[in-house]
Image (spheres, rainbow, N blue to C red):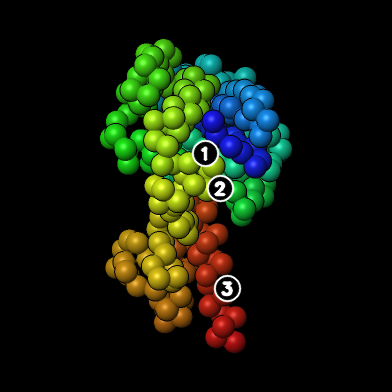
Amino acid sequence: MLQLTKPLAVIDLETTGVNLGTDRIIEFAVVKILPDGTRIQKRKLINPEIAIPATSTDIHGITDEMVKDAPPFRQVAQELKQMLDGCDLAGYNSNRFDIPLLIEEFLRAGVVFEMKGRRMVDVQNIFHKMEQRTLSAAYRFYCNKTLEGAHGAEVDAAATYEILLAQLERYPELGTTLDSINKTIGEEVIVDFARRFIMENGVEIFNFGKYKGKSVAEVLKAEPQYYDWMMKGDFPQNTKQKLTEIFTRTKLKKA
């Protein structure tokens, strides 16, 4: 049984696409598990205020017509924030997509969503570490069930939690806490969720472009105009936020 010290929110998003900088959430679902085992499920449709591409609709089945009367994210941001307050977070590919995109939406809405102190467990990481499969295959493999209604956010979030519990039974070495799980599979050190920067030996370095492998602080110190270029570019808000933190820290050290 999973041992929790605070609530765990298992989230799943359906979106207009997979670009963190430009795509939007159209459906949000959470399965919230309290430390006493109480389970709460919530789902919301969200108007992305942009057209949903047919290629995305083909995957999740959500059309422009279905969300035209739904509220935009900015109107439900505070409600979603309160729902997730005090929670650790889990999901399927959530560390690379769901959580980064959720943070982008909060930033666009002007709502502060603090990640400090939250633990994150990505069930896909466990799965890929142990078995190398997709969500539907994971559900069949771990739970011996067929996932009916895949790519519906509520169905996927609920299935993800079932898979997590089944993984704990199958792999005792994972332990029963979020800390023990992350210790076993290797917890990621994240600078920005789009991974434009990564951490090496305690130093943020560029993970793209002509300065790939170079210290972000050292590049900004030598070429401060690179900061301006990135801030004007089509980078995710979270990336720009982290860039500004490093740039500000660099200027203070220089002073």
Q: Can residue 214 be seen in this view?
A: yes
Left or right of 53? Residue 102 is right
Circle 3: residue type: Thr
Q: Nearer the viewer, residue 40 or 247?
A: 40
Q: Which of marks 3 and 2 is nearer the N terminus?
A: 2
Around disc 2, counting alpha carbons within 10 Å, would you say few (fewer than 14), some (14 to 19), or many (20 or more)?
some
Circle 2: residue type: Arg
Q: Which residue is drawn at 54% across and 30% down?
A: 1
Label disc, if present, on residue 248 of the rendered structure: 3
Q: Nearer the viewer, residue 30 or 180?
A: 180
Q: Say if 85 sits above or below 149 in the image.
A: below
Measure the alpha-carbon separation of dots 1 and 3: 40 Å
Q: Residue at x 37, y 16 (%)?
A: 144
Q: Which residue is drawn at 59% across and 87% down?
A: 255
Around disc 1, counting alpha carbons within 10 Å, would you say few (fewer than 14), some (14 to 19), or many (20 or more)?
some
Left or right of 144? Residue 247 is right
Q: Nearer the viewer, residue 143 or 146?
A: 143
Q: Tell me the quarter of the picture where residue 97 sits.
A: top left
Q: Name the outermost residue toward the front.
A: 172
Q: Report the residue marked by disc 1.
A: 176
Q: Say if 241 sits above or below 95 in the image.
A: below
Question: How far across and down, in percent of the image, does residue 177 sit?
Answer: 54, 42
Label disc, if present, on residue 119 of the rendered structure: 2
Q: Is mark 1 on a helix, strand or loop?
A: loop
Left or right of 228? Residue 85 is right
- Closer mark to the observer between disc 2 and disc 1: 1
- Closer mark to the observer between disc 3 and disc 2: 2
Q: Is mark 3 on a helix, strand or loop?
A: helix
Q: Which of marks 1 and 3 is nearer the N terminus?
A: 1
